Amino acid sequence: MRALFILVALTLAHVSSALPATSSYLTANDRSRLRQVLDGAWVPNDLATVHYGALAYTLLGQAVNKPQEVCKFLGTKTSETNPEVLFHLAGAWQAIGSCGTLQSAGIVKKLNEVASSDASPMSDVYYAVLGLKSLRQRPTDVAKVLKNVQSSLKKDDSALSLGYAFHVAAALGAEGRVIFDRIQDAVAQADEVDGRFLQFEGGLSITALVVSGSFNLATSQNKAPPLNHEQTTKFANYFLSRRSVQTVKGIYSLLDVLSTLSSNKFVLPVSISLEGSSAVSSSNPKILLKVSDVLGKPISTSTVTVTAESAKGGEDSVVILSKKKFEATSDKTVFSLNVFEEKPAPGQYSLTVSASLSQADPRIPSNIVTTVTMKAMCAVTISSFEIGTADADQTTQPKMHKVTYPSKLPSVLEADSQQKVVVRFQLVAAGSNKPLAVHQAFLRLWNDKTKQEIIFNAEKDSSKTYKFDMDIGAKDPDFGYLSGEFHVDLIIGDAIIVNPLMWHVADLKLAAPSSDAREDYTSSHASLFKPKPEIKHMFREPEVRPAAVVSNLFTALVCAPLLILLGLWAKLGINISNFPMSLSAIGFHIGLTSIFGLFVVFWLELNMFATMKYLVGLGALTFLSGNKMLAHIATRPKA
C-alpha cells in the first residue's frame, strides 16, 4: 500500500512539473476555409489587400489568382510616393514573382529618404525598411535609422511601436541588437486571459506583429528571445483561437506568425489534440492523439513517446488506467491507445497525456503534458419492462404485463378516467448487469388518427429503476378529452449510448370521458379564440368645484388689503410731487409692476420654466433701474 502511494505521488509530481501543450493546430480544413476567404476577397483594387493576400497564398502553398490582372494593377502604383503604398507595392511584387522587373530606383530613393528622416513616425520607418527589404536593399544610413527607431520608442513604446521596431531591427541584421532588449518590455505588456491565452491590446494583427517580430529579431541576432515555453504556448493558444478570422490581413498575420512559431530554432509550441472522435466503444476501442507543431507537422525527427498518465471520470470518478503507452501509427504525428481494454464504465473521462522525445531537443521541454476529454460509450439494453393499469385511488394493486424488447404487448390495454397507467423498466449496459441511468427516458402516447402526441418524463429512483404513473382523469385535459387507441412508445437517449432507441411497447385504449367534462373543455377551449371585450380606460373624474359664492368671497378677501391700502392713501393724502421723473425711476416702477403681473399670469397660465425665463429679464431691468434710482435719490440735496 505504501509503495502504491509513493508511485501515485511520484506520478503527480512528474505531471505537475511538466509544461503545457496547445490543444489544437491548423488543420487541413482550416487551410481550406482560409483559402475560400482569400478567394472571395481577391479583387485587385486595393493595394494592401493584394499585398497581404499574395503573401497569404504563398504561406498556404497556393498560386495567386489572376496574376496578369494583379500585375497590371500594381503597375499603376509605381509613381506613388507614400511610403505605405510603396511598402505594399514592393511586397506584393515580390510575393507574386511573375510581374517582371520593377523599376525601383525612384522607389528605393524615396524609401531611403523616409527611413533616414527625423520626422518619420515609427510606422513610416517600418514601411520604408521592410519595403527596401522586399526590393533586396538595405537603408543607406543604418545608424540614422536605428537612431530614429530609438527616438520614436522614447515617445511611444506601445506594443504596436515595439512590433514595428522589432521588424525593422531584424531587417537591419546584426546592427539591430540595440533593440533586442526591448522584447522583454513588449512581453510585459501582454494581457493574460483565462490562464490560457496571451495577447496584446489591439487583437490578432498587433499580437502577431510583436511575436513574429520578436522571433525574427532573435533569429537575426542568433540569440534566444526572452520568451519561455509556457508564454509561447499561451501566445500559440491565442493565435489558434483566431482561426476563424475573416479579413485578408488577419489571415496573413495568422499564417505568418504560426509559420514563425513552427520554424524558429528557439522555442517550439507543441500541440497534443484528439484526432477524430473523442468517443470510444466496443466497436471503436482506440483513441487517437495527434502530437505536432501548430501547423500539424512532426515536432522532431527523433522518436516521440506518448503516455497516458491517468484517466479519471465516469459516474464514480474512478481512475481506469495509469502509465499506459500509446502506440505509433503510420502517420508520424498520430498515436493510438486501446482504452476499452480497461473496460471503462460509460461516462466522461479526463485523460492526462504526456509527450517526450527519445533525444533532447533544445526547443522542446523534456516533458509536455495536457488533458483531453474522452467519452466511453456503450450499447443500452432493456433488462425489464412492465406496463399495466390500476385504480387511480390505489385501492387495488396494478395489473402488470411484462414486455420483452423489441416485441410489443400482444393485447390492447384499456383504461378510463378512474384509472391510471403504470410503467416500470430498468436499463443496463450491454454485457453488464449494472443498472444504467440515462439523460433522456420518455414515454410517448401517439394517436394515429388525430396525429396528436403527448410526451411524459420517466423518473428513476435510487435503484435506477424508471417509474411512470399517469392518472388518466388528471391528464384528460392534456389529451383534449379524446378517446380511442394510442400507441405507447419508449424513447431512450444519451450522449454515452451508441444505440438510442424508440420502442413501440403497447397500445392503450382510452374510454370516452363524461359528456359534461367534454363540453366544459370544448367551451373553455373555444373561448380562448373568441374576441375579448374592449378595454375602456376610465379617466379620473375632476374634483367638485366650490360654489360661486365661496369663490367670490375668497376673491374679495384677497383683494381687501389692496383696497384698504388705496383707501388709507386717499385719506392721508399721497404726496407724489417728489417722484423723480427720470428714466431709471420709471423703469424701476414699470419693472416692479411687471413682476407682480408676471406672478398673476404664472398663477393663471404659465409654468415655472416659462415664468423663470421672463423673470430673468424683468428682474435684471428692475435691479439696474432701481440701483440707479436709489443712487440718484441719495445724491439729491435734502430739504
Image: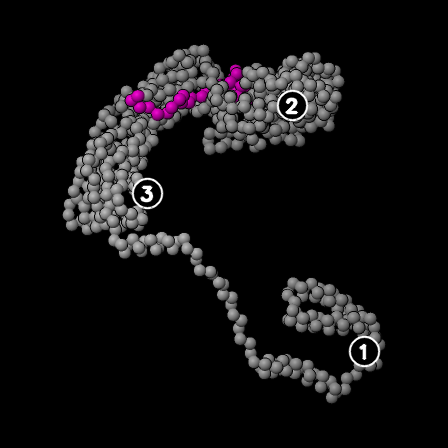
Q: Secondary structure at mark 3?
A: loop
Foreground residue among 48 and 615: 48
Query: Residue 197 in the image: x percent, y percent?
Result: 49, 29
Query: Residue 596 in the image: x percent, y percent?
Result: 70, 73
Q: Secondary structure at mark 2?
A: loop
Res 579 label: 1
Instruction: Name the residue tied to disc 2.
Output: 44
Foreground residue among 149 and 463: 463
Q: Is residue 424 left or right of residue 636?
A: left
- The image quadrant that residue 400 belongs to is top left
- The image quadrant that residue 331 belongs to is top left
431 up-or-down from 388: above or below? above
Residue 165 appears in the figure: no
Mark 3: amino acid: Thr
Mark 2: amino acid: Pro
Mark 1: amino acid: Phe
Q: Is residue 165 covered in magenta?
A: no
Magenta span covers which residues? 257-283
Mark 3 neighbour class, 10 Å CA radius: few under 14, some 14 to 19, many 20 or more = few
Q: Quadrant of the C terminus?
A: bottom right
Residue found farthest to the front: 449
Q: Secondary structure at mark 1?
A: loop
Q: Is residue 338 left or right of residue 622?
A: left
- The image quadrant that residue 515 belongs to is bottom left
Q: Residue at x 65, y 67 (%)?
A: 606
Q: Quadrant of the N terminus?
A: top left
Q: Nearer the viewer, mark 1 or mark 2?
A: 2
Q: Earlier in the sequence, mark 2 or mark 3?
A: 2
Instruction: Name the residue tied to disc 3.
Output: 450
Residue found farthest to the left: 396
